Image: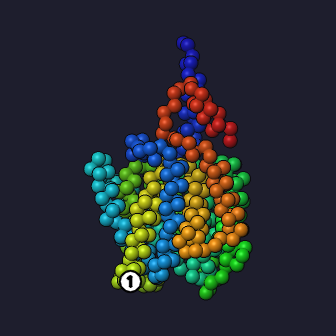
Amino acid sequence: MPRPTRRGAPPAARADRRTSPARPATARQGSGLLRHPAWGMAGGALCVSASAVLLGLARTDPGTASFYRCVLALPALVVLALPERRRQGPPSRGQYGLALLAGAAFAWDMLLWTQAIAEVGAGLSTVLVNVQVVLVPLLAWAVDREPVPRSFLLWVPVILLGVVLTGGVVEGGASGSDPRAGTIHAVLAAVCYSVFLFLLRRGGHGGLVRQRYVLVIACAALVSLLAGRFSYGLDLTPGWKVMGWLLAVAVSSQVVGWLLVASTSPMLSSHVGAVLLLLTPVGAVALGAVVLGERPTVLQLAGCVLILVSAYCAAAREIRPRGRPVRPGSADGSASGCEETSD
C-alpha cells in the first residue's frame, strides 16, 4: 500500500490536539474575531480595564457596584443570547452548574477586590489579584491535566515583576486603612478570580457561550445583592450620577469585555488566556492617565512594558489566526507542526 504523500498534516494535527483545548461548535461557525481568539481575549481585557476607572468615578459601596454592574448588563446579554438559544437550544444541566459556580466566584471576586482597594491600596490589591496568571494554569493542570509549557514557566518571574511594578508596590502601593485585612481580602479575591476564569473557560468547551454567560452574570448579581445587603453595603437608589457610571461599567466590562473573554478563552490554552488578561492593569494605568489625570511613574511604565513583552512572548504562537484552513502538506502546515512540537 503506498504511503500518504501529505506529510505535513499529521504532525500539525497531533500538535493541535496536544496544545489546544476542545473547541465548542459555536466557535467554528465564527466571526473573524473568533478566528483570532488571542486578539479577542486582549480586546476583552482592555475593555475590562475601564471598570477600575469608572468604579473610581462612581464612588459607591462594593455591594452596590457589584450588584448594579451585573443587573444593568443583563437586558443586553439576554438579547444577545436569544438567537443562540433558538439555533442550538438551552444549556445542559451540567453547564448550568458550572455557570452558577462561576457566577458566585465572580461576585465574591468583585466584592473582595473592591473592599481591598480601600484597605490596602490599589497597587498591592491589583498585584495580588493578578496572581491568577499562575493559579489558572495550575488549576487547569490539576483538574484537566492540561500541560503547562516550560517556556511559560520561564516567563512567570518576569510577568510577576511587571505586575508588581505596574501596581506601584515598590513606591508605596501598600498604603490603606487596614493593610492586613486588605491583603487577606485581596488574596481571597485572587482565588475567587482564578476559579471564575477557570470555570468560565472550562464551561465554554461545551458551547452555548452566551446563554451560559447570562447565567454567570445573573448568579453574580444575586450573590452581590445578598452579600451587599448583609455585609458589603447596598444602596438600591444611589442616584442618577452613580447609576450612569455603573451603566458605563456594565457596558464596557460585563457586556463587551467579559463576553469577549467568555467567547475566546475556551479557544486558548489556560496559560495564554491568563497572561493576556494582564493587559487589564496596563489598560487601567493608561486610562487613569487619560481620564483621571494620573501620571504613572517610570517604574509603572517599565512594569507595563514588561507585561506587554511577556504577554506577547507567552502567547506569540496563538496570536495568529487559529480558524484559518491550512492545506495539508503546505509550508504553513509543516511549520505549525514543527513549531508546536519543539517545546
- Residue shown at 31% from the left, 60% from the top: 78
Q: Is residue 11 visible?
A: no
User: x, y percentage for residue 114?
Assistant: 52, 77
For disc 1, the marked residue is: 238
Rendered image quadrant of residue 7: top right
Left or right, residue 62 beside residue 139: left
Splitting the image into 4 quarters, where does residue 179 fall?
bottom right
Q: Quadrant of residue 230?
A: bottom left
Residue nearest the observer in this picture, 102 or 87: 87
108 up-or-down from 197: above or below = below
Please identify the quadrant where the C terminus is shown. Answer: top right
In this rendering, the answer to whether 124 lies above or below 196 is: below
Looking at the rendering, in which quadrant would you find the N terminus? top right
- The front one of 225 and 307 is 307
For the view shown, which residue lies furthest in the top direction? 1
The answer to whether 234 appears left or right of 292 in the picture is left
Q: Position of residue 83 (x, y in %)?
A: 29, 51
Q: How is the image coloured?
A: rainbow
Query: Would you say 180 lies left or right of 84 here?
Result: right
Name of the residue lying farthest toward the left = 86
Graded by Cα atoms within 10 Å as few (under 14), some (14 to 19) or many (20 or more), the crowding at tag 1 reads some
Coordinates of residue 200 in the picture (x, y in percent): 47, 58
Which residue does the image show at 56% across and 69% down from the upper left? 290
Residue 287 appears in the figure: yes
Residue 326: % across, % down = 51, 31
Residue flagged by tag 1: what amino acid is it? Pro
Say which residue appears at 33% left-offset and 62% top-offset.
76
